[in-house]
Image (cartoon, rainbow, N blue to C red):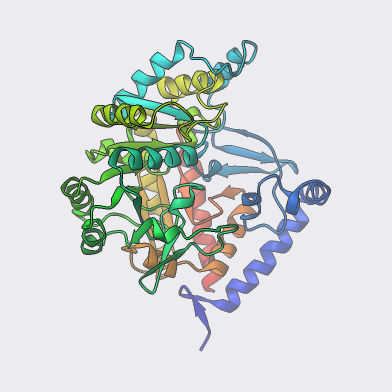
Amino acid sequence: MASLEAGLPVKQVDAMIKRETDRYIQSNPISQKLGIEARRNWVKGVPHHWMLDWSTPFPLFVADAVGATLTDVDGHTYDDFCLGDTGSMFGHSPAPVARAIAAQAGHGLTYMLPTEDIIAVGTALERMFGLPFWQVTTTATDANRFVLRWCRAITRRPKILVFHGAYHGAVDDTFVRLKDGQPIHRPGLIGQVYDLTTQTKVVEFNDVPALAAALRDRDVACVITEPALTNIGMVLPQPGFLDDLQRLCRETETLLVIDETHTISTGYGGYTRTHGLKPDFLTLGKPVAGGLPTAVFGCSAEMAERMRAAEAEAGPGYSGMGTTLSANALQFKAMRANLEEVMTPAAYDHMLPLSEKLARGIEQEIRQRNIPWHVSNVGARAEFVCAPERPRNGSEAQAAMHGPVELAVHLYLLNRGLLIAPFHNMTLVSPATSEAQVARLVTTIGQCLDELAA
């Protein structure tokens, strides 16, 4: 009997990887040449090591990207469903944002002083998310890091709680996982010299009893979570879980931080507004300024007052929060254009039904071939998972990952002009994505599965 992985013959998977790798090498000579030259000055040949996480034998060098289409240096065009892993979720270089950047470019980029744009941006953020008070950082990592610091200052509690498999940027405190029920450092963590598990509790997503037990001692300053896990595969909240999470936080006077950096795909105002969540703090990065390095965190009026009290108690000096380029003039010009003209309810009216069509189309291709996979989606974000059942937590999602199968599919799609996120099997639909692009992705996935299952 043939050996199987994720319901597919291993022999076919290996053959596809070999065949598609050879095809990529033959089709991309300029990218290969640039990759060799880049090794002279860049560690591992790239300016950021995540650029090596694609399925390719060497990096794909980009020449241009507009809307939902990307062009590489060898002249190939791609329907882009990765969109910078959410950084360009509303399309590459949206025209209003591009105009705003060009208009600001000759008038100074950063002053460490506010401009009148902060009034419009603050109003737009409150309108979108319902939270009255905001701060701007350069990355979502900084937004999460600073919010954790504020939560500890406000509550005078030392610990935080995360869910197994969650990702909140490069925040040290959140790099804790479960193994055999015990907290450990996230595998692969480099240079960590103190034990994160002493100040960070970790439980499984959707596990209400474990969450209640972890909060019982009232030593947790905050729970930080995505409302649906998106970075270990997609893990959706079970019915009632988010209600229980909010209730337990209130009962134990634990603050709730909702990280919308990926789940902003849910709809206008993210998962928070769509499903009526009431977080104490909300963080959002990546797409908020149309692709420029920018993030925000918002809070309730009560939290803003408690922040002021904590700051007064700490006295003068450096808070440990802030970077020189945060909230610069260019960020605000781009953010204003993006929030007012791009990241609109009308954009979601295009994105959400098209993403639903994409998700159900892939699902149909899978079912027609009796392959034991499924598809989950959160608004404009969809993901096919190489397992028959939807995972209920991070451990089940981790067990559903099949590296060789996913590598084969990613390479097959890329060689046919289709990009999906390299870290997992995620697709994004932008306001610029067309029905023809969606139809082509669905059809090509079906063709790929035919070859894999042959």
Residue 208 in the image: state x and y as whole percent. 22, 60
Q: Is residue 343 visible?
A: no
The answer to which quarter of the image holds residue 108 is top right
Q: Residue at x 39, y 30 (%)?
A: 347
Query: Is 385 left, or right, of 239 in this rendering?
Result: right
Q: Residue at x 58, y 16 (%)?
A: 111
In this view, the residue farthest toward the bottom is: 1
217 versus 321 height, above or below = below
Q: How many marks?
A: 0
Residue 50 in the image: state x and y as whole percent. 61, 51
Residue 236 in the image: state x and y as whole percent. 31, 55
Query: Is 310 left, or right, of 218 in this rendering?
Result: right
Q: Residue at x 22, y 51 (%)?
A: 245
Query: Is 125 left, or right, of 255 in this rendering?
Result: right
101 versus 15 height, above or below = above
Q: Is residue 108 visible?
A: yes
The answer to which quarter of the image holds residue 55 is bottom right
Residue 90 in the image: state x and y as whole percent. 47, 33
Comparing 207 with 299, the one in front is: 299
Quarter of the figure with the C terminus: bottom right
